[in-house]
Image (spheres, grey):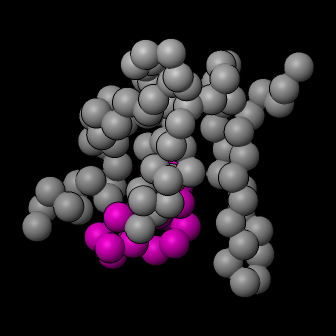
Amino acid sequence: MGAAQSVDLLYDGERFIQYRAARLRGEGAHGTGCAFSAAIAASLALGADLEQSVRAAKRYVSAALAAGFRLGGGRPLLNHFAAATAAVSSPLRRKANSR
């Protein structure tokens, strides 16, 4: 049986930082790495620091994966709309909306 958690590591040049979320059952979705890196880049562009950006991206991708869906016979797809709705409480989201 697999691990109970999904762990991403960030090395900032001095230390390793772990970002944990519950591991979701299933075969995995297409595009998680691309969504993760794009979410980090978007958070950085909004002015967040690297640690905040990775934390927000982890939440975003976890929510998109949890609400994933199938379209045809391929691997599940991320539900970015569900993830965006879940991110409303994010401090980065509030910062973006205050501009």
Where is 98 relative to 56, above or below?
A: below
Find residue 11 and report its image quarter.
bottom right
**Magenta stretch prevailing secondary structure:** helix
- For the point 44% across and 43% down, the residue is 60
Q: Which residues are magenta?
A: 42-58
The outermost residue toward the right is 1
Where is 39 relative to 73, above or below?
A: below
Q: In the rendered image, which quarter contains the C terminus? A: bottom left
Where is 6 relative to 45, above or below?
A: above
Q: Point out residue 62 in the picture as x, y percentages from the top left corner.
A: 52, 36
Q: In the rendered image, which quarter contains the N terminus? A: top right
Q: Is residue 26 at least partly visible in the picture?
A: yes
- For the point 45% across and 24% down, the residue is 68
- For the point 23% across and 62% down, the residue is 95
Q: Point out residue 67 in the picture as x, y percentages from the top left corner.
A: 43, 23
* Image side of residue 3 versus residue 58, left or right: right
Q: Point out residue 46 in the picture as x, y percentages from the top left corner.
A: 29, 70
- For the point 83% across and 30% down, the residue is 3
The outermost residue toward the front is 73
* Image side of residue 94 versus residue 86, left or right: left
Task: Give 14 or 24, whichever is nearer the viewer.
Answer: 24
Q: Is residue 52 magenta?
A: yes
Task: Give 78 or 12, whichever is nearer the viewer.
Answer: 78
Q: Is residue 92 magenta?
A: no
Q: Point out residue 9 in the picture as x, y percentages from the top left corner.
A: 72, 59
The outermost residue toward the left is 99
Q: Is residue 86 at least partly visible in the picture?
A: no
Where is 46 relative to 30, above or below?
A: below
* Image side of residue 81 versus residue 51, left or right: left
Find residue 69 and report its image quarter.
top left
